[in-house]
Amino acid sequence: MKRFTHILLAVLVAATLLLAACGQSSPAAAPTAPGAAEPTKAAEPTKAAPAAEPTKAAEPTPAPDALGSGSSEIVIWHGWQGDYYEAIKQAFADYASKNNVKITLLRVPDLNNKVQVAVPSGQGPDIIAWVNDQIGKNALSGTIQPLDSLGIDAAYLTQNFTDVASSAMVYDGKAYGVPESLEAITFIYNKKLIQTADLPTSTDDLIARAKAFNGPDKYLFVYSSKDAYFSAPWWQGAGVTLVTPDGKTELSSDKGLKAAELIKSFSTIMPKEIDYGVADTLFKEGKAAIIMNGPWAIADYQKSGLDVGLATVPVVSSSGQPGQPFVGVKLLMLAANAKNPTGAVELMKYYGSAEVQAKLAQVNKQVPANKAAQEQVKSDPIIAGFIAQAANGKPLPNTQFIDAMWDPISKTLEAIWTGASPPDQAIKDGATLFDEKAQDLK
């Protein structure tokens, strides 16, 4: 039955693609990649589903942007939107003009599913713009191809990009992408409520300072505590590998118990009922001095009139190691069956250059993956803060088993935070659920 469902879905998506687009020049439906409006974070605030999902009109097919007029064409499927996309589009327009090529940019809703059908049938793009956690599943399905024989290998990556960005591109010993920018959560603080010298340096320090600072409707520190993505700094800082390349987890371990007990202790210094929205509101209203959040939130905080600073996640006291958030790496991948692979690879190298990445960082306030570009923009205190945090982080896992991780960790956190299970039982139950889900992916 499961196989029949996948086949039926594939037929329906293929029919949609073929009706909307007759060839690569103008594919009509396209994938969504995280952009300014859709951060890399794998954890949007959880929302309750309506009892009955209302019927929705089909999303209008986005029109492609054709840049340049050369005889050769490079097609990119992406999900960039708004002002964030405009800066990227200008970078590609410059390349098209200087190199006499045509670059077609197409925003494709539901990228994950559509590339799986379009690429094998020859209806896909040359380049897929996405995030590094998509590498493993797409490499295994043959949707993307390795770049090692095309001049982009591990040596090229380490020469040009940061360690965290370079390692995020490698799957099963092969390079599968050119990194663009980095996203990681970090400590963001309200300078009106706390001075830099008073920021906690360890988790023990954080808890002690919170107990002294907290008052009625006033908190030192808040974050989306029951969210798997937002809890990663504590697990990984404690030394826990949440998902291994071969589909295992260290959630239920001595180190995992230390992290679980730390997370339990946070429930004594934060509101019992808290999620992304609650934490965000408390910070914006000046009722919390520190929030752990990502670069997507900065503009909103500044619009709210907050003078914010950034600090790396403090040391996890049980291990003596800094808190280590996931680092999502936006990238370009070369599609299998690309019609212009040589041109696509040259364009990918251009997009990964220090010149382009520094310019995008200045306009979009993103953290470049290119090492030389980071040197050019690190005078910006916000970008510098996220550069420092990314250096302490771990790449978002690019193994196909990442899909086995999110739900078990979320359920573990819920049990810990609410007291439904003691920490030792919660991590055991979470690991068991992980193993079940990982087995389904093998």
Image (tube, rainbow, N blue to C red):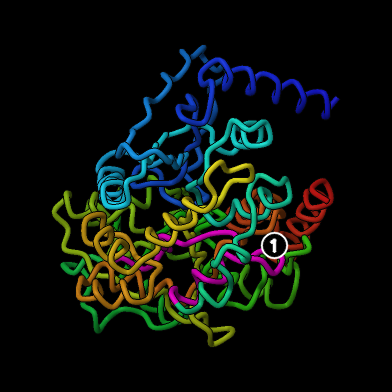
**Range of residues picked out in magenta:** 160-188
Q: Residues within 10 Å of mark 1 (few under 14, many from 20)?
A: some
Residue at the location (24% across, 74% down)?
376
Q: Amino acid at mark 1?
A: Pro
Residue at the limit of the structure toward the left, as seen here: 305
Residue 282 falls inside the magenta stretch = no
Q: Number of callouts in the render? A: 1
Q: Is residue 219 visible?
A: no
Location of residue 329 in the rendering, given as x and y in whole percent from the top left corner? 48, 60
Q: Is residue 358 visible?
A: yes
Location of residue 140 in the rendering, given as x and y in whole percent from the top left corner? 73, 51
Residue at the location (69% across, 69% down)?
173
Residue 163 falls inside the magenta stretch = yes
Location of residue 156 in the rendering, given as x and y in whole percent from the top left corner? 51, 74
In the displayed structure, 290 sits above or below 434; it is below
Residue position for label 1? 422
Location of residue 109 in the rendering, given as x and y in whole percent from the top left corner? 48, 31
Q: Nearer the viewer, residue 214 or 260?
A: 260
- Secondary structure under tag 1 reads loop
Quadrant where the image shows the N terminus: top right
108 left or right, relative to 363: right
